[in-house]
Amino acid sequence: MTRIAIIGGTGVYDPRVLDNVRTCSVETPYGEVDYTIGEFAGQEIAFLARHGSKHSIPPHLINYRANIWALKKIGVESILATTAVGSLVKDIPPGQFVLIDQFIDFTHSRVNTFYEGGERGVVHVDLTTPYCPELRKIVAQAAKNSGLPTTTSGTYVCTEGPRFETPAEISMFAKLGGHVVGMTNIPEAVLAREAEMCYMTISLVTNYAAGISSMPLTHSEVLDIMKENTDKLQTLLLGTLRLLHFRQKDCTCYHALKEYGGFKL
Ligand code: HPA
């Protein structure tokens, strides 16, 4: 049984931390999803590259529903996602990990639910705690154990992309209480909650956001910082997987749709 999955974001395209990796695919109502399965410390872990293995899918065209459905279908209960983010605040510098605990959604072209009326009905999922609090504790512990520079809370502003933001937008996001900005966490986090899965994001700051940095932003700068920090990210993922291994507890995320009779594939 594959109970844990990693969704790799920008700069994280292969499951380097896993052994005996094999490629698989699974059918969903939203299309077929390719993923890999590997082993870590005797347990099977699924790995999915959010942008495709060659960063060929832009943020607004990612098949978020297919990805989450696929992981649910293969039995995944807990998802660790990685994202590259820009920082909105001077004291969260590039190279810092941020364990986000809230989000503000500025996307506008994405379907963000499995429930569009009709046969599946309508669901209003609670997101008071949008990221799994149990997983956050575990990732925070892993970060502490490995001494990595980590901010243990923060608000993620999700933009539509694929363009970077204007300084005026960044200044507004900061005034609204955002700490970091990225293009992919929504609707992924929302769909995972609808699917009653534990979901947690490890954000790595790759740059100061537009206007905070006086330099124009480039995608290669984002990739360079991701690359520089790959080893640290692997350390954090491995540390987390080690601690997750012993997690047997029930979690409120597994009952997110209790009021609606639970999530059905
Ligand atoms: N903006 C949006 N997404 C990002 C950024 C940014 O500055 N850096 C990495 N992903």
Image: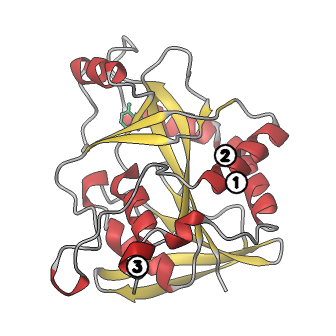
Position of residue 139 in the picture relative to residue 36 (left or right): right
Task: Check the image and name the residue furthest to the top.
Answer: 214
Q: Is residue 239 above or below residue 111?
A: above
Question: Could you say where residue 236 lies in the image, as x and y percent from the top left?
Answer: 72, 48
Mark 1 or 3, nearer chain start: 3
Residue 186, relative to residue 196: is it above or below? above
Towards the viewer: 44 or 100: 100
| Callout 2 amino acid | Leu
On the image, the x and y values in percent for residue 234 come to: 70, 51
Count of marks, rendered view? 3
Q: Quadrant of the C terminus?
A: bottom left
Mark 1–mark 3 distance (CA, rounded to whole Å) = 23 Å
Residue at 84% across, 41% down: 145
In this rendering, position of residue 203 left or right of residue 45: left
CB atoms at circles 2 and 1 under 8 Å apart? yes
Task: Choose the circle earlier in sequence order: 3 or 2.
Answer: 3
The residue singled out by tag 1 in the image is 237
| Mark-to-mark CA distance, 3 and 2 | 25 Å
Figure check: 159 above or below 1: above
Q: Residues within 10 Å of mark 1 (few under 14, many from 20)?
A: many
Q: Residue at x 25, y 73 (%)?
A: 115
Label 3 amino acid?
Val
Disc 1 and disc 3 in contact, CB within 8 angstroms: no
User: In the shown orientation, is residue 175 left or right of residue 141?
Assistant: left
Alpha-carbon distance for marks 2 and 1?
6 Å
